[in-house]
Image (tube, rainbow, N blue to C red):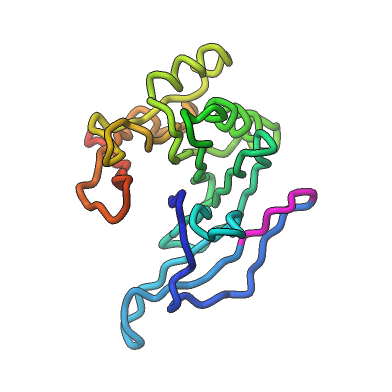
């Protein structure tokens, strides 16, 4: 899940699949990206939302080994906010979000909108995981979620090390508690640094 996606790699190939949910003016494009060779292909699927039409710097993207069964777009929580996009693989949904700068004032609203969307009767069989740059410390978000009465439904999964080069844990995940694996997933910071934020890995603990 990528929150500050620039341009799609030049080697990526559009599949022609263009997703734009009815009533939501935020399209998602699907591309294939071969990380291997012509003879030994290693295909990834890119789901890309070109929301930064000006600087083209803070777009949203998801890269997956599997082709998505479904693609989701959740409306922005405020006029200034960005949408939440996600892909469905079977009964699991993986979403990415980027809260507003200056403290992530819409971070809790992003979680609330996501929770309410997947509490609809036709969505309740799905387990979801939301990863993002929340621009807010995880303990602050947890406090906000208590105010929103959402702490019973979700768990915040955050690494213990700063995820921004200037300090601060801003990049982490939120998982719905009904997911069978919700209590087994932990977050850790990846040492690779290609921007001012560190990538975060989410891995299942061994039983």
Near-viewer residue (134 or 22): 134
Residue 54 sits inside the magenta stretch: no
Which of 75/32 is in front?
Answer: 75
199 left or right of 130 in image: left
* Horizontal arrangement in the rendering, residue 205 relative to residue 20 (left or right): left
State the image quarter where residue 113 is shown. top right
Residue drawn at x 57%, y 32% as measured from the top left: 110
- As for residue 27 lying within the magenta part, the answer is yes
33 is higher (above) or lower (below) than 107: below
Rendered image quadrant of residue 43: bottom left
Count of labels shown? 0
Q: At x 47% / y 38%, what residue is drawn? A: 129
Query: How far from the left and from the top, in percent, is residue 181?
Result: 38, 34
Q: Main secondary structure of the magenta part?
A: loop
The residue lying furthest to the bottom in this view is 39
Q: Nearer the viewer, residue 116 or 51?
A: 51
Q: Position of residue 202 (x, y in %)?
A: 32, 41
Q: Which residues are magenta?
A: 23-28
Residue 69 percent across, percent down from the top left: 58, 57
Q: Residue at x 30, y 39 (%)?
A: 164
Q: Residue furthest right?
A: 23
> Residue drawn 71% across and 57% down?
20
Q: Quadrant of the C terminus?
A: top left
Residue 7 is situated, as x and y percent measured from the top left of the image, at 48, 66
């Amino acid at each position: 899940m990528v929150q500050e996606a620039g341009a799609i790699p030049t080697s990526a190939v559009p599949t022609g699949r263009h997703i734009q949910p009815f009533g939501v003016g935020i399209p998602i494009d699907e591309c294939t990206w071969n990380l291997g060779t012509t003879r030994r292909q290693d295909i990834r699927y890119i789901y890309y939302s070109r929301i930064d039409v000006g600087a083209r710097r803070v777009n949203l993207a998801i890269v997956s080994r599997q082709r998505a069964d479904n693609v989701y777009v959740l409306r922005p929580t405020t006029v200034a906010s960005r949408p939440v996009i996600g892909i469905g693989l079977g009964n699991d949904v993986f979403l990415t979000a980027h809260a507003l700068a200056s403290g992530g004032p819409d971070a809790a609203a992003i979680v609330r909108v996501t929770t309410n969307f997947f509490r609809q009767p036709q969505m309740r069989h799905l387990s979801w995981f939301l990863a993002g740059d929340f621009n807010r410390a995880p303990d602050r978000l947890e406090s906000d979620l208590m105010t929103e009465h959402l702490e019973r439904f979700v768990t915040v999964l955050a690494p213990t090390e700063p995820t921004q080069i200037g300090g601060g844990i801003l990049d982490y995940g939120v998982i719905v508690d009904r997911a069978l694996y919700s209590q087994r997933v932990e977050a850790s910071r990846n040492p690779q640094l290609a921007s001012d934020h560190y990538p975060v890995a989410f891995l299942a603990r061994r039983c």
